[in-house]
Image (cartoon, rainbow, N blue to C red):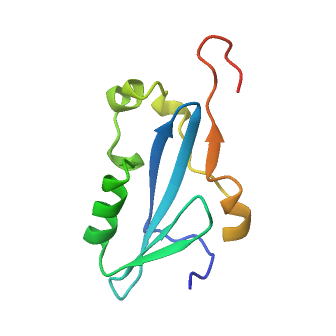
Amino acid sequence: MSDETPHDNDQWWLAALPRMLVWSRLRVLDSGVAEVFDCDGRINVYESEDVARAALMDAEFRALDGMDADDAEAWGLDLEELEPPRGEDDEDLRERMIQPLKNPLTGRD
């Protein structure tokens, strides 16, 4: 359903699990329909951006563009180091949607 090219209206969302960071991409189409590309490579379709955002929040995701340093610190993250995954296409991107977090004691994954 998605054409796999970067869009200016892509919004990145993240959830922090123990020692893992999970990303989702919210994309609003010209029609107003919203697509959420998840870490399993699925594209979930929602009737609107508001419905998609509510679904992401229900799943305990946070919008990257709405996070501040205090929000990131509460999750044990450094806002300056948070960067959405990149890929040549959605298949390549899917492999990068889950990222290991560094162990705070050792500084390694």
How many marks can you see? Answer: 0
- Which residue ends up furthest to the top in the rendered image? 105
Q: Which of the 4 image quadrants contains residue 6?
A: bottom right
Which residue is at 70% across, 27% downward?
109
Q: Residue at x 36, y 82 (%)?
A: 33
Q: Could you say where residue 108 lies in the image, as x and y percent from the top left?
A: 71, 21
The residue nearer to you, when weighing 56 against 89, is 56
Q: Please indicate, yes or no, whether residue 93 appears anywhere in the rendered image.
A: yes
Which quadrant of the view contains residue 86?
bottom right
Where is residue 1? Give x, y as percent.
Answer: 56, 85
Q: Is residue 89 visible?
A: no
In the rendered structure, the answer to whether residue 2 lies left or right of residue 108 reads left
In the image, residue 31 sits, relative to residue 72, either above or below, namely below
**Which residue is depicted at the point 32% across and 46% down?**
66
Where 107 falls versus 28 (above or below)? above
Q: Position of residue 56 (x, y in %)?
A: 37, 58
Looking at the image, residue 76 sits to the left or right of residue 89; the answer is left
Up the image or down, 12 lies above or below 1; here it is above
Between 36 and 86, the one lying in front of the other is: 36
Q: Which residue in the rendered view is the most extreme toward the bottom?
A: 31
Residue under the image location 67 percent in, 17 percent down: 107
